[in-house]
Structures are given as structure tokens and as C-alpha cells.
Amino acid sequence: MPKEIWKDIPEYEGLYQVSNFGRVKALNYHRTKEEKIIIPSKSGRYLHVNLYKNGKSKTYSVHKLVLKAFIGDSILDCNHKDGIKSNNYLNNLEYCTHNENIKHAVETGLRDGKGEKNVKAKLTANIVKNIRENKYNLTREEFAVCYNVYISTIDKIRQNITWKHV
């Protein structure tokens, strides 16, 4: 079984550490000189912790802290190799490009990129059905304004070029 290794969190040296198991601890919890493991909160899909310095609080994703402390800082995305966002063990994390991260998410089934599951989607399956049925005889321009999309988006939906799965 691997050993838990602790490293200072860059910019929080002497205040906080993070381990290769993805745990974060305060080194001087409430100025008691006691160490305390911080229980992360879940915000969205990732685990977060609040770190305090000079009376100011800042929220960090645990996986980013692990990579920053053990590998170094990077402008690249952080990827969870097994796709489990709460698994912040160092051996489960890696830096990769944004495109590689998206490709990994699609390959592992975390994201299919279709319809409402696409992070940039403005429409829902029900709206697409509405556009195709067009019960109220709206023009493509009226649909575009109503749903804040381009006219070409309405055309592609009506021609079944996009949203084919609906």
C-alpha cells in the first residue's frame, strides 16, 4: 500500500498541506498549533476547500491543489483518469489540454456532447420538438429571437442536421 506523502501548498507554505491521497490539512487550525484535516465541500462536480491567509478566504478545487503541489502549476486542464471527480489521488490526476480532457470525457462516457448534455446547449429536447412541430406557425426568425439562437440553428434543427437524437 502506498504511503501518504504531504507537501506544502504553494502560496500557503506553513499554513496548509495537501497529500498524494488528495487530503488537505491546516497546520495551525484556528491558531491552536494543531493540525486538522479539512473536510472538502462538493460544489458542482468537484471537491473544494477554503484556504485562509491574511484574513482572506479563497476557494480551491482539491484536484488542482494536488497537482500544483506535486507536479507544479500549469495552464493546462486537470484530468481525472478514472473519471471519478472525487478521486483526487495523485496517481489518478494528470495535466492535459482542454481538447484532450473533452475527448477523455466522451471516451469514458462522462459526456456525450449531444443535446442538453452539451455544456454550450441553449436548447432542450422539448424546445427542439416544439421547433419541429411548430404548432403556432412561428417563423425561423421568431424562434431564433425567442430562444436566443441563430437562424441557422433553427434551420439545422428543422432539417434534422442537428439534434438528430430527438
Image (cartoon, rainbow, N blue to C red):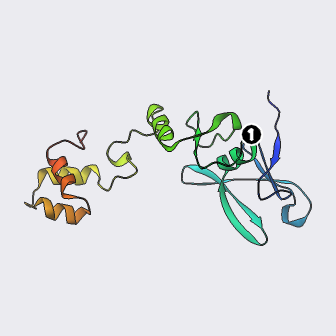
Q: Is residue 155 above or below residue 82?
A: below
Q: Residues within 10 Å of mark 1 (few under 14, many from 20)?
A: some
The image quarter in which residue 51 lies: bottom right
Q: Nearer the viewer, residue 13 or 5?
A: 13
Tell me the SS state at disc 1: loop
Looking at the image, which residue sits at the far top? 1
The image quarter in which residue 22 lies: top right
Q: Nearer the viewer, residue 65 or 34?
A: 65
Q: Horizontal and vertical percent for residue 52?
A: 76, 65
Residue visible at 68% across and 64% down? Answer: 58
Q: Horizontal and vertical percent for residue 161?
A: 20, 41
Total residue callouts: 1
Q: Horizontal and vertical percent for residue 134?
A: 11, 55
The C terminus lies in quadrant:
top left
Residue visible at 65% across and 35% down? Answer: 92
Whether residue 166 sits left or right of residue 55 in the image: it is left
Looking at the image, which residue sits at the far bottom? 55
The N terminus lies in quadrant:
top right
Q: Is residue 145 above or below residue 21?
A: below
Query: Mark 1 = which residue?
Result: 21
Looking at the image, which residue sits at the far right? 33
Q: Is residue 138 above or below residue 56?
A: above
What amino acid type is highlighted by mark number 1? Phe
Residue visible at 58% across and 46% down? Answer: 76
Q: Horizontal and vertical percent for residue 152?
A: 19, 53
Whether residue 72 sits left or right of residue 161 in the image: it is right
Residue visible at 82% across and 39% down? Answer: 5
Q: Nearer the viewer, residue 62 or 77?
A: 77
Whether residue 12 sits left or right of residue 94 in the image: it is right
